[in-house]
Image (cartoon, rainbow, N blue to C red):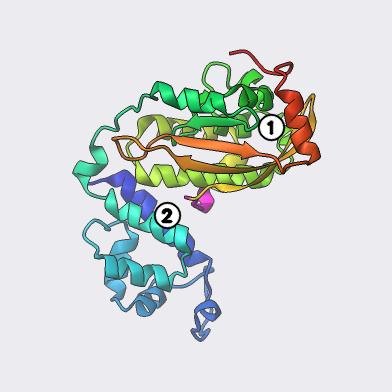
Amino acid sequence: MVNEVNRGDVRDFLVSRRARLGPADVGLPVTGRRRVPGLRREEVATLAGVSTEWYTRLEKGHISDISADVLTAVARALRLDDEEREYLRELARVAGPERARSPRPAVALEPHVQWMLDAMTLAPAFVTNGRWDVLASNALARALYAPLLASDVTREHVNVARYHFLDPGARDFFADWADAAAIVVALLRTEAGRHPYDRDLRDLVDELSALSPDFRARWAAHDVRMYISGRKTFRHPTAGPIELFYSTVELPTIAADGPLMTVYAAEPGSESEDRLRLLTSGEFATPR
């Protein structure tokens, strides 16, 4: 059976990337009036060194039998960055119907993961799956994320993406809400490309698309993200503004695509570190 979901992801991604480029961006002359923005299919085909018919077929989602060299040529023609190139390779990897429809195993966290989290006493840390369901956390993360844990939209099912887009308070809690929201959507888009038949993920995307115009617009942009690190500022309701640096790494498991651990840290000697120390008292932790 054809992987129709995957075909849609391939089509939407390539069309969105073609639309953001003009002839001048890739060194082509501008000739004639253009009815729509972006490169034409035949222009991308020329840049990639393939026929227009072949590229048209690729853009319709037929990617399972494409060689790595041709994918590289298309990625170069569309000026894809490193993360977008990797995403395109992921789409090709899961395009086969048997692979796409194979059940995704549930990953149970081993006890030592919680031990590691609890050992981090001045670093908020939590573990999620690719849908950004929170699977485990340490005391400081629960204190830091108290507004999320207390939210009506997450009480039954703690999910970072749901809080971002369905709780109005998230815009106050995250000082850089727009940037954080863009990263969340890009990560979910990447996860959907890797696992086109993850029903729980599709249900989450459908829910957020139906209830949040912001999510719907960002999802349509088809931006992707694979590597997660940066700086984030929280407006904690009790401790005040806290600026933290963070990195997310994948935990090794027998199954591919293991859970993700996110660890935050404040700059040593900073006011944010002092406020984290205030939170370590447990006074502001939200019980679960």
Q: Residue at x 68, y 43 (%)?
A: 232
**Secondary structure of the magenta portion, mostly?**
loop
Q: Residue at x 72, y 29 (%)?
A: 169
Looking at the rendered structure, the kind of residue marked 1 is Ala
Question: Can you identify the residue that label 1 sits on?
Answer: 170
Check disc 1: other Cα within 10 Å, few if <14, some if 14-19, many if 20+: many
Q: Is residue 40 above or below residue 126?
A: below
| Among the two numbered marks 1 and 2 on one chain, the one whose residue lies closer to the N terminus | 2
Which label is found at residue 77? Answer: none
Magenta-tinted stretch: 219-226
Q: How many marks?
A: 2
Task: Give coordinates of residue 212: x percent, y percent.
Answer: 60, 35
Q: Residue at x 81, y 38 (%)?
A: 271
Question: SS of the residue at dot 2?
Answer: helix
Q: Residue at x 40, y 54 (%)?
A: 87
Q: Place residue 60 in its image quadrant.
A: bottom left
Task: Give coordinates of residue 119: x percent, y percent.
Answer: 55, 26
Q: Is residue 11 above or below residue 190?
A: below
Q: Place residue 278 in its image quadrant.
A: top right
> CA separation, marks 1 and 2?
29 Å
Say whether residue 148 is visible.
no
Looking at the rendered structure, the kind of residue marked 2 is Asp
Magenta region includes residue 222: yes
Task: Give coordinates of residue 234: x percent, y percent.
Answer: 72, 36
Question: Can you identify the residue that label 2 sits on?
Answer: 12
Question: SS of the residue at dot 1?
Answer: helix
Say whether residue 279 is visible.
yes
Check disc 2: other Cα within 10 Å, few if <14, some if 14-19, many if 20+: some
Q: Is residue 173 above or below residue 152?
A: below
From the viewer's perspective, is the residue at label 1 or at label 2 nearer? Answer: 1
Task: Give coordinates of residue 3: x percent, y percent.
Answer: 26, 45
